[in-house]
Image (cartoon, rainbow, N blue to C red):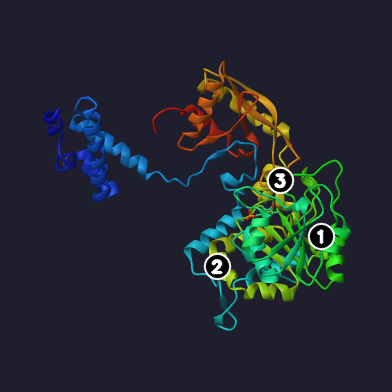
Amino acid sequence: MAAGLRSLPSVGELLNRPECAAAVAQYGHDLTVAALRSTLTDARAAMLENARAPDAMALAAAALARLLRDAQPLVKPVFNLTGVVIHTNLGRALLAEEAIAAAATAMREAMALEFDLGQGKRGERDGLLRKLLCELTGAEDATIVNNNAAAVLLTLNTIAKGREVVVSRGELIEIGGAFRMPDVMQRAGARLREVGTTNRTHARDYSEAITQRTAALMKVHPSNYRVQGFSSEVAGADVASIAHAAGLPFVNDLGSGVLIDLSGYGLAREQTVAEAVAEGADLVTFSGDKLLGGAQAGFIVGKRALIAQINKNPLKRVLRVDKIRLAATEATLRLYRDPTRLAQKLPTLRHLSRKRAEIAAMGQTLLPAARAAFTDYAVDVVDCESQIGSGAMPLHGLPSAALAFRAKSQAAVKSLAQRLRAEPKPIVGRIENGALLLDLRCLDDSAELATAFARFGKPA
Ligand SMILES: *Cc1c(COP(=O)(O)O)cnc(C)c1O
């Protein structure tokens, strides 16, 4: 055995092979040497388990495979065929071409980000989007931060640090990814004053909770769940009146936050940001990359004096948005100035408003390629329901269609799901009623998926 181990070539000998010289040219000397060392270590370990000594060619090939594998980016695109349009774990909204172009320019070039071009001196980052956000929401002033979680944190830290915020028990939500409203409030330094019960909160619950310690009244969009049956909540306009009568601000966290009425696109009617502002909210917070369809961002819009206070908070600097997302956000918001063309321009809205018939037709065109590639499975086009995702309108399913893959055993279905996720561009579906469904709602390029099917399981 020891003699066998000694028969392995050295790193230096392997480096002299032509394929390794090519690897050095491509990946650099240090990475190639490291890959050869790791490969030799593995070979020695295998030989101690009685494997035969590999020859130099096999060792070089193994090292090259290792280099290729390690060179693959981990932040990579996938086919989102889960049926969840705004999938937080798959990166939420897909941006409009206008936003992509603006972001690319911002990456490549210097930008007048905090530079007043008129005066030739330091300017204000938020000033760039203020006018647009005010126009779209009717608010007096606006600011932008990293995401809506940051918007809520910054808002409460600014106006309620060391004091109480009154919130209904029915709105103390957990959104997933460890965003729990009570925890965020606590981290903001605000004390939560829960009122009402899980299913019912009344106007008097808010008014009776107000004391010297109260900093604000708050409503939180329930997002990903609904209380149904014997339930009641207090309308934002009424909470606003109660707050204002006591000289307190009313904060409304809308979560997803829609800028326009989406019922024309086959979605549920939701209060828009402008409506929330109009009914008396002093501050409204919402996300940039949920239903709005833009880059990750959090917006705070509302009263000028409060926004000024928020902008002075040192935490604002910690939570600020970089030039790339600022550029993408501006371009996305500009699209809302012409709502008639929005569904054409915003991929999120286009995907959300797709009709089942169109999706099913796409399934039919893909069916032959799917059947040819997956001969061990029964493949059909079936009706299914997509979801909006990211906590928006959780009870509002979207009629959709999917390629369904069935097999004799559940293990075979699971194994297919796993192998599809291991493809160079992973194909992510969902398992429902024993079948693997590839919901085609978010597929833009059916030819690309057909090609992926054809090369399924073949080495790269
Ligand atoms: C999603 C959501 C948040 C968090 O927003 P992010 O943009 O994900 O940070 C906060 N509040 C509500 C009500 C939400 O739905």
Picture coordinates of residue 455, whole percent (x, y): 46, 29
Distance from the alpha carbon under mark 2 to that under mark 3: 28 Å
Q: Is residue 24 left or right of residue 275?
A: left
Residue receiving disc 3: 224
Q: Quadrant of ligand 1?
A: bottom right
- Closer mark to the observer between disc 1 and disc 2: 2
Picture coordinates of residue 100, whole percent (x, y): 56, 55
Count residues near mark 1 (Cα–Cα under 10 Å), then give few for <14, some for 14-19, many for 20+: some
Residue receiving disc 2: 318
Residue receiving disc 1: 275
The kind of residue on which mark 2 rests is Val
Under 8 Å from ligand 1: the CB of mark 3?
Answer: yes
Distance from the alpha carbon under mark 1 to that under mark 2: 30 Å
Q: Which sits in the foreground, 387 or 96? A: 387
> Does label 1 or label 2 sit earlier along the sequence?
1
Location of the N terminus by quadrant is top left
Q: Which sits in the foreground, 346 or 92? A: 92
Location of the C terminus by quadrant is top left
